[in-house]
Image (spheres, helix red, strand yellow):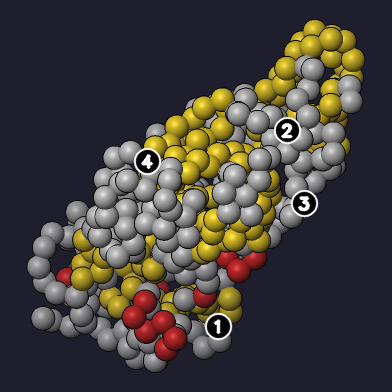
Amino acid sequence: MRKLFNLMIAGALLASFSVNAQTYVNEMLQADVERDCYIEGGTLLYNDNGDAYYGDGSYVQKSSASIPSSVSFTRDIWGNKNITGFIVNILIPNDRPDFDKFLTIEYSVDEETYQEVPDLKIEKSYDAVQGNNYWIDLWYQASLPEGVKEIKVTMVARDDVANWIPCYRRTEIFYEGGTPYEYTKPPYLMIVPTEFAVDFETENYSIDMAGSENATSTIEVVDNPVKDAVNGSDKVLKIVQDPSDPNWGWENADWFGVAIGLLSGEDNQLTEISEADGRYLHFSILRSENSVFGMETWGGTCAYKNQEIPFTGSENWQEIVIDLADYIGTTFKQFYFSPNERYGTDNIAVAETTYLDNIYISDSSASSGIADNIVSASKVWGGNGMLYVEGEAGEVSVYSVAGVEIGAYALDGFLQVELARGIYLVKSGNTVSKVIVY
C-alpha cells in the first residue's frame, strides 16, 4: 500500500489533501494511512475486509503507544494563507474517563514556537446504532488568532492503554480567503444529562427482565403494598424470583434480574455520575428475606459491575444509598438489580418477592425520607416539568432531597408549580410527600 506520510515521527507534514468549499480536508482515505483500519459495528478492525463503517470509504491512522505522534499543518499547503480555525476528529474507546487527555493541539505564528489553542471545544459523539459499544468520535475545534501559520496535532503516547490508543480520522482546516470558521455541531452529539429518577408513577422508564428463559419469575408495576414513612408512593416495581426456573447456562443457574432505564424519547437516557450534581445512587427496597443483592450499571462508560450488597430483610421499606465516587465522570443508561447474590435463583427454595422503588441519583448521601414523611392528606404528583398539589387551603413548601427549601406556595384547592426535573419533598400541613418531576 502506498504511504504518503509517517505519523510515527513527530512533526510529520501532511502532503495529501482535497479542497472542498475552500477548506483543507484530509479524510484519512485508505491510501493515506500506514496501517489499514476501518470501522465496522463500532469496532476498529485492522484488515482490508468488509464495508467501511462511515459509508465514505474512511480509514483511520492508529497512533503509537510509546512515541508521541504529531502531525503539522502548515499554510504552504494551501497557498501561504494564514489559518483561521480547524476541526479535528479522532476515535477513542468509549470507556475512558480521561477522554480529553489523548490529544494536544498547538498553534504557531512563527513556525518555531507553539502555544496552546485558546477556547478549545472538545465534544464526544457516537452512532447510537453501531458506534456506542466500543469506540466514540472525539471532536476538537476552535477559531484561531490572527497570523497563525501552523497548527500541530499530537496524539499522546500511552503505554498503559496500548490496546486502546486513539486513531486519527479527519482534519478540516479553515484559512484566510476561504470559508470562515464557524462552530459545527458534531453528528450524534452525546448529550449527557445528570438526572436519573424513576418512581414508577409515570411512564418515563423502561424495565427489562434480564434472563429471557425465566418463565415463572416476573417483574411488574403494582400498587404499593406498604405505605410508610420511607415510601408512601402509589406505584412500585414487584419482582418475583421463582426457583423453579430451569438452569440455562453460564454456571449461575437461571440468571435473573431487572434493568431499569430512564426514557428520553424512545431510548434510555444517558446519565453522567457527577460530583456536583449526583454521585449517590438511592433506591428503596421492601423485602422480608435476607439477601445479598447483585447490582451493576449497563450502557455508557461506568464500570460499576458485579457488585454484591448485603441486605437484612424487614416488613417495612428501607432506603439504600450507594456511593459512586469511584465512577465520577462516567455514564450509564440502565441500573441493573438482581435480588439474589448469584444473579440467579439457584440458592433459594421458595419464590421470593422484592419490591423496588424511588431509584435516583443525588448529590446528597442523606436519605430523602424524614421522620414525618407519611402519606399527605393532599394529593401530590409530578409531571413534565410541573408539580401538582390538590387539597384543602393552606401552605405548601417544596424542598430538595438535601433539605434546601425551593419555595413556599399558597394552596387553595389546586396548585401548579413549574420545576426543573428532579426529586422533591413537598410539605403540606404537617405531612411530607416525595415527588419526581420529569
Which of the labelled discs sits on residue 114, or is there none? 1
Q: Which element is circle 3 on?
A: loop
Other residues around mark 1 within 10 Å, as few (<14) / some (14–19) / many (≥20): some
Mark closest to the chain's N terminus, 2 or 4: 4
- Estimate the spatial distance between the alpha carbons at disc 1 and disc 4, rounded to whole Å: 63 Å
In-image side of 332 versus 399 (left or right): left
Seen from the viewer's position, the closer of residues 261 and 127 is 261
Picture quarter containing residue 253? bottom left
Residue displayed at 29% across by 40% down: 215
Name the residue at 55% across, 83% down: 114
Q: Nearer the viewer, residue 410 or 123?
A: 410
Circle 4 sits on which residue? 217
When the figure is inspected, residue 162 is found, relative to residue 292, above or below; the finding is below
What residue sits right under mark 2 in the picture?
Answer: 228
Residue type, label 2: Asp
Q: In the rendered structure, are the residues bearing label 1 and label 4 in contact, judged by CB atoms less than 8 Å apart? A: no
Residue 164 sits above or below residue 371 on the image: below
Q: Position of residue 146 (x, y in %)?
A: 57, 67
Q: Nearer the viewer, mark 2 or mark 3?
A: 2
Q: Which residue is mark 3?
A: 366
Residue drawn 50% across the image and 35% down it: 238
* Observer-nearest of 184 and 362: 362
Percent x, y for residue 205? Answer: 49, 35
**Mark closer to the observer (3, 4):** 4
Q: Amino acid at mark 3?
A: Ala
Front position in the image: 226 or 365: 226
Q: The C terminus appears in which quarter of the rendering?
A: top right
Mark 2 or 1, which is nearer the eye? 2
- Image-based side of 2 in relation to 261, left or right: left
- Please say if the residues under marks 3 and 4 sit with CB atoms less than 8 Å apart: no
Judged left or right of residue 149, residue 8 is left
Label 2 or label 3, whichever comes before in sequence order: 2
